[in-house]
């Protein structure tokens, strides 16, 4: 049996005295698309941020490739992060520089590659996300879907083994959202990545999820396949999918 790439045990997250996540335990397995879902305010993005130490958990354990990361020093954890890509909800592109320069940032920060090699990598990544024609454009010149693809190219710059996506379809029309989902699945197959996605978009969940992690009120109500979730008879899950359909 494959070893989990990420193993979370008994994770508790707090803002001040308020508990946001309570006793979350979950494994992310190689090659899967794991979708973290639930209603607004259930702790989806908080879980993502705690796994990546963008926020420090109150207690618990988070392991990447079997190594506990919550006690790692910054240089050691930076080595872990170089193997991980992150697509932020709004893309988080820098508006004052071109798409080319945005994608170059992680390569300049984390590698000592010569300029001609960086240039080749940038062009390859933009081709992968079907955005080669926008290489020298600025974010303000891009549509919403193009911005997401440019941000995705930047997330792929260091050839991550795990890609995290926070609400990738947010703000996109249904057709653009479907195209982005298709692209993410294609990239998973081509690059043999594991993907962890936070979303509340039902259409996307049905298209991309190998497994869902359903949060409600800071607790994990379900961890398994979408088909099993829909048959589990859990009222909160039934309501989530029923209301979202109409």
Image (cartoon, grey):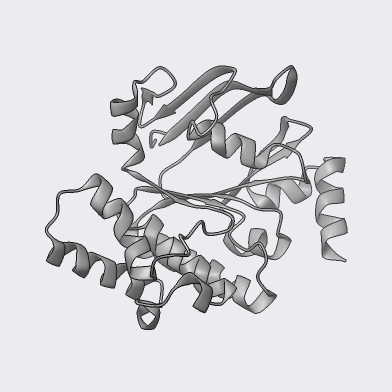
Query: Residue 244 occupies which quadrant of the picture?
Result: bottom right
**Residue occupying image coordinates x 86% and y 57%:** 242
Front position in the image: 231 or 116 = 116
Residue visible at 39% across and 64% down in the picture:
153
Q: Percent position (x, y) of residue 65?
A: 35, 32
Viewer can see residue 90: yes
Residue 201, image x, y percentages: 70, 59
Specify the quadrant that holds the N terminus.
Answer: top left
Q: Is 10 on the left-hand or right-hand side of 106? A: right
Question: Is 8 situated left or right of 69 in this image?
Answer: right
Instruction: Please state, as top left, top right, bottom left or bottom right, where the C terminus lies in the image.
Output: bottom right
Residue 65 vertical position relative to residue 11 in the rendered view, above or below: below
Say whether residue 32 is left or right of residue 2: right
Q: Residue 32: in sight, yes or no?
A: no
The quarter of the displayed image where residue 127 is located: bottom left
Q: Position of residue 82 (x, y in %)?
A: 31, 42
For residue 107, above or below residue 9: below
Up the image or down, 71 lies above or below 229; here it is above
Residue at x-position 67% and y-position 22%: 14
Task: Name the residue rendered at 25%, 45% in the picture.
Answer: 110
The image shows residue 101 at horizontal and vertical percentages of 33, 64
């Amino acid at each position: 049996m494959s070893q989990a790439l990420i193993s979370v045990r008994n994770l508790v997250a707090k803002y001040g005295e308020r508990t946001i996540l309570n006793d979350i335990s979950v494994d992310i397995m190689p090659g899967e698309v794991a979708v973290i879902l639930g209603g607004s305010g259930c702790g989806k993005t908080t879980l993502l941020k705690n796994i990546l130490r963008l926020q420090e958990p109150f207690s618990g354990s988070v392991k990447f490739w079997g190594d506990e990361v919550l006690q790692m020093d910054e240089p050691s954890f930076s080595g872990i992060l170089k193997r991980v890509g992150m697509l932020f909800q709004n893309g988080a592109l820098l508006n004052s520089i071109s798409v080319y320069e945005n994608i170059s940032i992680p390569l300049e920060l984390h590698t000592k590659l010569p300029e001609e090699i960086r240039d080749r990598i940038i062009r390859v990544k933009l081709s992968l996300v079907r955005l080669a024609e926008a290489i020298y454009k600025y974010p303000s010149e891009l549509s919403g879907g193009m911005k997401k693809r440019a941000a995705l190219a930047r997330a792929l710059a260091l050839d991550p083994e795990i890609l995290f996506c926070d609400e990738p379809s947010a703000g996109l029309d249904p057709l653009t959202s479907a195209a982005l989902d298709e692209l993410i699945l294609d990239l998973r197959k081509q690059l043999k990545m594991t993907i962890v996605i936070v979303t509340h978009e039902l259409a996307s969940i049905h298209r991309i999820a190998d497994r869902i992690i359903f949060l409600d009120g800071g607790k994990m109500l379900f961890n398994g396949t979408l088909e099993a979730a829909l048959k589990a008879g859990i009222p909160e899950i039934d309501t989530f999918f029923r209301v979202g359909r109409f």
